[in-house]
Amino acid sequence: MAVNSFPGQGQNNPLSESIAALSEAELIVYFANRSHVVYPDLPKASDEQLKNAADILANRFSYTGETFQFEPVFSWKPNPSADKEWQIAFHKHYFLIDLIQAYRHTREVVYLEKWKQLIQSWITEMGSGYITLSDAQVEAKRMESWCIAFMLLKGTQWHDHIPGCFLQLFLSRIAEETHYISQHLKPVRNHRTFQLYAIYLVGVLFPELTTHSSFLETGTDLLSKNLLTDFQRDGVHIEMSSHYHQLVAETGIRMLELAVLNKISLNNELVDRLHKAVRFSLYLQWPNGDIPLINDSDNGNHLDLLRLGSHYFNDPELLWGATLGADGRAPDHTSYCFTESGYFILSDTWGSDKKSYAQRQHVFFDCGNLGEGSHSHYDLFNFCYFLGGQPAIIDPGRYTYSGEPDTNGTLWRHYFKGTAAHNTVTIDRLDQTRYLNRTKHGPDVQWVGREYLLGQKSDWVFGRAVSENYSPQHERLFVYVGHEYLFILDKLHSDDLIDHHYELNFHLPAGTESNLISQEGHYRLVTNQCEIRGITELGMHCQIKPGWVSQYYGIKHQAPILSVNQSGSGDKIFTTLVAPLPNDSLTINSISCESAGSNNQSYSVGLIKQDQHYYDRFIIPASANELYQQEGLHFQGKFLAYREDGEGKILFVTAKAASTIVLRGKTIHNDSAGSNVEWIP
């Protein structure tokens, strides 16, 4: 049945003829004992859900970092918060799930009574579409909450306490709200996904509704199509947010789960795309189970998503991620490029058990375009670095959707979206992409010339950022050297003969204690997890300045930022090394520039591994068309890095667009066309 042929609101009885003929008592018995709809495994109550359910009994509601105490009888229409997101979250009725979880856990009927009372109160006062800003995604999430709570009643004695007249009212409003959602579908992206999933969910769970087949057919068909547009072919959600990727991937997996359990056919292309989406979660997830907060994002947890994916896709690698290395099989690739999104995940290992999994390194690097919609941050070349069991370099998150300044005049929506709130270079104190308002921005910053090599010993990524907000162009060479530490070279190209200001920022977690030592030509910042070393040019300044981080919507904490800045005309360079501390297996002794006064860049890093001295060399010639020569080295190409021991033995080589590599008299590579190279003896 077409969407526009659903029965309208206000129908007298939404139930099929045989079910509508049942008495109220018979209706309760029927729904308490029906078995033809198969539910997924029901989760146990969490401590957070139990705590929140106790608050709800006392009419205390907490969302977006704010808690409000309501009267025993209250109106659903006023918003007690200045942030409209509070009211949006409130009307999604997530608290109903918490109440039923508490009832299942304690068997205390007071939680079930509160569930009934709040639903009845809402139905009595509210019509559909009260929060029109939401494009009916509030109705969709509310229906999802109602359906999940209803499923959670299974196995309890709810039928001894809920009257048939309430169940009739409940089912009638579900049909009415679902019809409303079907008439107010958003044209694209995640809100449409949530809307269609609600329609699908109601269609699966309530075959007793006269509109069942219409809901099921429309939900299955349109949701399948929308999920295929929600996820790019590499599996990354089109809005490029680690948080929304989780929400939409969970929606897709729940759709698949219900389809398998209830023998609903889904097309193979969708199943394959969902598999790729969950595999992105596998790579995205930090070793402690958290996620980097990319674009608009709160802290999330992909473990349940990975667990379900491992089951339904029969994928032992997903199980490895779901159990944090306790079960399943480690993936074959430690580093991976998600080519359409431009997201890179780099790592040293997948570990061999839970302990080694937790201690592995994890690098997220963004070399892609802005995501679709309004959840993008202006963060091209941003990165996050997790090591030693904790995040060391972070993305500060989103904090708020409010487009209004606070009482001090600070526009926090812009602050957290802005380039300066990310681990990249800010030019002339401007964003890479111009902020217009809470949902709109100017022309997208563009990446140009992205190249990469993910090797057995080292990974590197190169790209150039071109912005309409300013004339200089930013090139970043990002090298994960030996899968042990980061070498980052930022080159700022400007030929307009105008002085420009450049600021390179590194955001540290809240509570990080650090020591910054700045000497002539060098600086070194030390935390309990990592060290950041840099080469300072004349006129370059570095400092620790206050910043902010927000792991959950509406809650922010102060956090330190390492800021390195310089000004002037012509080309400028930032050279940075980020390495783990403490590190028993590798110690950085020094970083030095060996090309002073030259248009070429040549750097040397001295390090110690297991009491042996090693040297990492980095060569970036001024021209890839000319042969670069040093003692023992002939190189033609765009970039070269190699490691040698104290006796001059070459241990590995990696290069970009190389035609000639001769080291210590040995020809490593000879290809007139030029190619990306990794060489290991």
Image (spheres, helix red, strand yellow):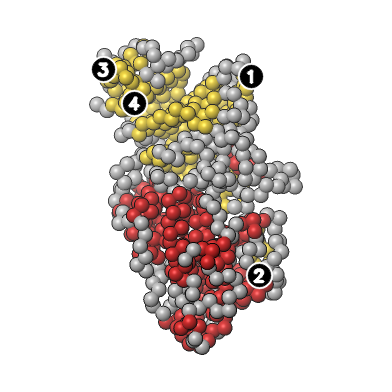
Q: Amino acid at mark 1?
A: Asp
Residue 459 in the image: state x and y as whole percent: 37, 32
- In depth, the one of 57 and 387 nearer the eye is 57
For label 3, the SS is strand
Pointer 1 or 4: first along the chain: 1
Q: Residues within 10 Å of mark 3 (few under 14, many from 20)?
A: few
Q: Amino acid at mark 2?
A: Met
**Quadrant (top left, top right, bottom left, bottom right) of the C terminus:** top left
For label 1, the SS is loop
Residue on which disc 1 sits: 499
Gap in Å between the C-alphas at discs 3 and 1?
44 Å
Pointer 2 or 4: first along the chain: 2
Q: Amino acid at mark 3?
A: Thr
Pointer 3 or 4: first along the chain: 3
* Residue drawn 51% across the image and 23% down it: 491
Residue on which disc 4 sits: 676
Q: Amino acid at mark 4?
A: Asn
Residue 179 in the image: state x and y as whole percent: 55, 67
* Residue drawn 50% across the image and 78% down it: 15
- In depth, the one of 664 and 44 nearer the eye is 44
Count every numbered label the image shows and give the total: 4
Residue on which disc 3 sits: 667
- In depth, the one of 620 and 141 nearer the eye is 141
Residue on which disc 2 sits: 126
Tell me: residue 127, above or below residue 589.
below
Tell me: residue 676, above or below residue 630.
below
Horizontal placement of 473 versus 327: left or right?
Answer: right
Horizontal placement of 609 versus 159: left or right?
Answer: left
* Residue drawn 57% across the image and 73% down it: 173
